[in-house]
Amino acid sequence: MSYETILVERDGPLLTITLNRPDRLNAMPPHMADELGAAFYDLGDARAVLITGAGKGFCSGADLAARGERSELETKGGSHRALQNHYNPAVSQVLRAPVPVITAVNGPAAGVGCSLALAGDFVLAGRSAYFLQAFVNIGLVPDGGSTWLLARAIGRANATRMMMLGEKIGAEQAEQWGLIYKAVDDDALLSEARALAEKLANGPTLAYATMKRNIATALDGTLPEVFLAEAEGQRIAGASADAMEGGMAFLQKRKAEFKGK
């Protein structure tokens, strides 16, 4: 499938998606959100996904002025429709992906770009990168799932600080808060993110998918629900070829070669 606003590259089990509007710091119009969702819908045999931005920014937020799409914003309820029809489905696709998702944040990740960055299972950020929820400056509220993501990642106090004060949170501060996995030197960002993505792409894919579902259950469910989800996940993972390979590798004292099955 060809895309207008993103680049999609397959390299063995790794799928790399690059937001590709560098002249706009990869600001996301509705059709970019649609293309991102489509790329996740068609993962094929990919076993991990790496998302980054072209140029000097990851994603500077929504762009409803692109390709004449401002008209959607200017109509009554336009922002609501854009979120429900484009942005929320795209972020949801990333969150629900059955494979590990790594986001490599270069430069600003603002608004829905912040939501997209934090939707990754592993978020790496260059030291010059920052995360921003500036909606308060124009009398609006954070969206794209960022309220849910921030509150669960860094707690009420810091989520409130980010949203109500509209402060830029640098990569190192984000790491200290536990908002992201790791802050790295800018020139090492892509190499470190790719190395992590390749490691995950060669891991036990089915087990990863089950872990992701169980973490989601743990965030919103009760302990009995988590017990049940873990037991069911263990039943499924235990019957996989990867589990058999992992057991044999342990007994034979060698590195397991997982196939994602």
Image (spheres, helix red, strand yellow):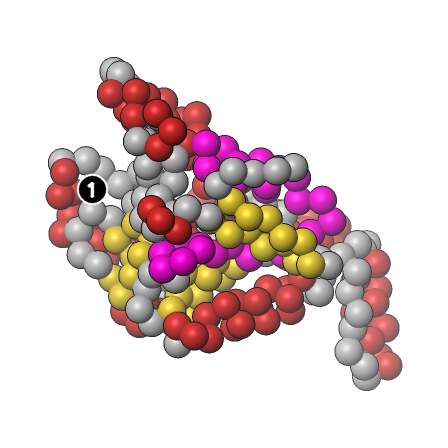
Q: From this viewpoint, is residue 168 visible?
A: yes
Is residue 44 covered in magenta?
yes
The image shows residue 70, relative to residue 167, as above or below, that is above
The image shows residue 247, relative to residue 259, as above or below, that is below
Q: Write down the region rendered in magenta.
A: 31-59
Question: In front: 117, or 249?
Answer: 117
Residue 23 coordinates in the image, percent (x, y)? 35, 49
Q: Residue at x 25, y 15 (%)?
A: 76
Question: In front: 144, or 44?
Answer: 44
The C terminus is located in which quarter?
Answer: bottom right
Q: From this viewpoint, is residue 80 visible?
A: no
The N terminus is located in which quarter?
Answer: top right
Q: Residue at x 64, y 66 (%)?
A: 198
Taking the view exactly as shown, the residue that stands out farthest to the front is: 23
Is residue 154 covered in magenta?
no
Horizontal placement of 182 versus 235: left or right?
left
Amino acid at the residue labelled 1: Phe
Q: Residue at x 36, y 60 (%)?
A: 56
The image shows residue 115, relative to residue 31, as above or below, that is below
Taking the view exactly as shown, the residue that stands out farthest to the bottom is: 253
To which residue does mark 1 refer?
135
Horizontal placement of 85 versus 129: left or right?
right
Residue 258 coordinates in the image, percent (x, y)? 78, 65
Q: Residue at x 74, y 49 (%)?
A: 45
Residue 152 coordinates in the image, percent (x, y)? 36, 52
Residue 101 coordinates in the image, percent (x, y)? 55, 55
How packed is label 1: few (under 14 Cα within 10 Å), some, or many (20 or more)? some
